[in-house]
Amino acid sequence: MRSGSAPEPAPSIALIGLGFVAAVLALIGLGDLPLRDFDEATVARVALELRHGLGEAPLLPTLWGAPYLNKAPGLHSLIALVIGATTQPNQLPSEWTIRLAPALLSCLVVPLGGWLQWTLRPGDRSSAIATSVILLSLLPVARHGRLAMLDGTQLTAMALLWLALLQLNQRRWSGLWGVVAGLMASAMLLLKAPLLVPSAVAAGLALIWGQEWKAWNNRATACTGFMLGLAPGMGWHLWHAHIRGAEALWLWGGDGAGRVLLDAGEGSDLGWRVPVIEIVEGGWPWLPLVPFALIWAWRWRQSRWGRWSLASLLTLAGAVLPLRTQLPWYSHPLWLPIALLCAPLLVWLVERPSSSSVSPDSPRPPCRWLLLQLPSFWCGLGLLLLLLWLSSFSSIGSSLAPYRGLAAVLGLGWCSGGWWLRSAAPGQRRLGVISLACGNVAALALLFHSPLWLWELNESWPVRPVAALARDNSGTELTLKGYDERPSLNWYAEQRIPRFKGGRSRRLSDKPQENCIIEGQTGQWTLADCR
C-alpha cells in the first residue's frame, strides 16, 4: 500500500486478463482427441442419459440404465445442457461439446485465486497477480481442468466458497456473500460431495484461529443467506435418499470415507506417495518455493494470509494423503493453497525490500541466501532443457523429437527468466518472472495443440476402430474378450460391451448370430460366435 495516499485499487483488469488467457488456453485443441477412460467417458454417458431423461426420477443420474451412485450430477447436468444446445437428438456429442463446460468453469480459478489472495493481503497487488499467474501456468491445473472431469470445477467452487467466507465481515453485503457461500457449498455437494468436508474444515479452522467470526456484521443475515444457498445441494441429496434409499449412502461412504478406511474403488495402492509424486511432477517451475513458503507462512501465522494458507494446505493434505486408494487427480485441491503460499515469496524475489524499508514486526523469508540461489537454479534447468532440445536433432536423441518444441520454449523461458531474476534491477527481475510464466504458458499451448496432452490414451489400444465394428453389428449382444470393460469403448459404440467371462468361441459362419464376442490384437479385431 502506498504511504500517505489512498489504498491501492484491486488489480481487477489484470486478474480478468489472466482469466481470459486461461480460457483461451483451455479451448486450444479441446476436441481434437477422443475421451479417455475412465472418468471422461463415464461423465459423458451419464450426461447423455440425463439429457434423454433416462433416470427413474428427474435429476437422478444413471449409467447404462442403472442408478449411478458414484457422484452427484452437478457437472453432468451442465454438460447435458450443452449437449441439448449443440447436438442433434440422434447424434453422438462431440468431444468439444463434452469438455466445454468443465474447461470454462475450471479456468475461473485463475482470477478467483488472485482475488482470494487480494482479500487475504489487502493492498498487495503483486501477490494477487502472482497467485493468478502461478495457477495459470501450472500443468495439472490447466490439463485436468480441460478434461470432462469434476476436479477443475470443484477447485473453482472451493475458491469462491473461501472467498465468500472471507467477505462476511462486510457491513452492507454480508447477506449476499452468505448466499454465495451457501451456493458454493451446494455446488460442491453436487460435484464431489465428500470434498466439501475438508474444504469447510479448512475454512473453519482459519476462521476460528483468527477469531474472524467476531468481526462478522449481521451474523443472522449471513447465516440465513448461507442456508438459502445451501438448500439446492441439500435438497438434491434428500431427494436422492428418498428415491434410492440406502443406496444413496454409497456416494458418501463408498466414495468418501471408504477410500480412507478401505481399499474402495479403482486406484493405486501406493497411498500417500501418489499425491506427493503428482505435486513433485506438476509443480514446476514454482515447486522449489514451497518449503520456503511454508516456513514463512508459519512465521506470519498471526496474519490472515498465514492462517488461511497454512490451514487450507494442511487440512486438505490431511484429507488427501491418508486415502487407501489413490488416483493422480486426488491431489488437485492442493494447488490453490500452494499458489496462495508461493505467490508472496515469488514477489519477494522480485522486490527484495531492504532491511530499512521492512517493518521490524514483519518476518523475513527463511534461508534468504539459499532462496536467492533459486534464479540460478531455474537458469540451469532452462539450459538443461535447451541442451535436450539440441540433442533431439541428433541420432542419439531422436526419441525426444516429439517434445522438441516444448523443450525449446520451456528452456528459453526458464533460462532467460532465471538470468533476469539474478539482476540487481527490479525491472529486469519482473521480466524474469514474466519470462518464467510465459515459458510455461507457451509450452502448455503447444502441448494442447498436439496429441501429447492426453497421454493416458497411449496406455491401451484405441477404441474407435472397435467401436466402429460394434456399430456395424448393432442389435447384437456383444462382449469383449481378453480385456476389461472400457467406458470409452462403450461411449463410442453407443452400447455397453461388458467383458467376456467364459465359454468357448468359434469363428463366425454364414449363420446369423445373436450373441458374439469381440476379440483380437491391437489394430486387428474380429467378431466370434459365443454360442
Image (spheres, rainbow, N blue to C red):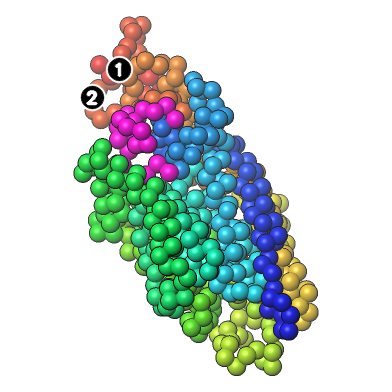
The reply to whether residue 180 is in sight is yes
Q: Give the range drawn in magenta.
A: 51-74
Q: Main secondary structure of the magenta part?
A: loop
Packing grade of label 2 (10 A; few <14, some 14-19, many >=20) is few
Packing grade of label 1 (10 A; few <14, some 14-19, many >=20) is some
Asked whether the beta carbons under mark 1 and mark 2 sit within 8 Å of each other, the answer is: no
Name the quarter where the N terminus is drawn. Answer: bottom right
Name the spot of residue 200 as percent of width and height, x first. 39, 63
226 with respect to 505 (left or right): right
20 with respect to 78 (left or right): right
Q: Mark 1 highlights which residue?
A: 515
Name the spot of residue 91 as percent of width and height, x first. 51, 23
Q: Mark 2 highlights which residue?
A: 503
The reply to whether residue 266 is in sight is no
Helix, strand or loop at mark 2: loop
First of labels 1, 2 by sequence position: 2
How many dots with numbers?
2
Taking the spot 59% from the left edge, 58% from the top edge, the residue there is: 110
* Badge nearest the viewer, 1 or 2: 1
The kind of residue on which mark 1 rests is Asn
Taking the spot 29% from the left edge, 51% from the top edge, the residue there is: 252
361 with respect to 237 (left or right): right
The kind of residue on which mark 2 rests is Gly
Taking the spot 58% from the left edge, 52% from the top edge, the residue there is: 107
Name the spot of residue 488 as percent of width and height, x first. 44, 34
Q: Measure the alpha-carbon separation of dots 1 and 2.
A: 12 Å
Taking the spot 38% from the left edge, 56% from the top edge, the residue there is: 227
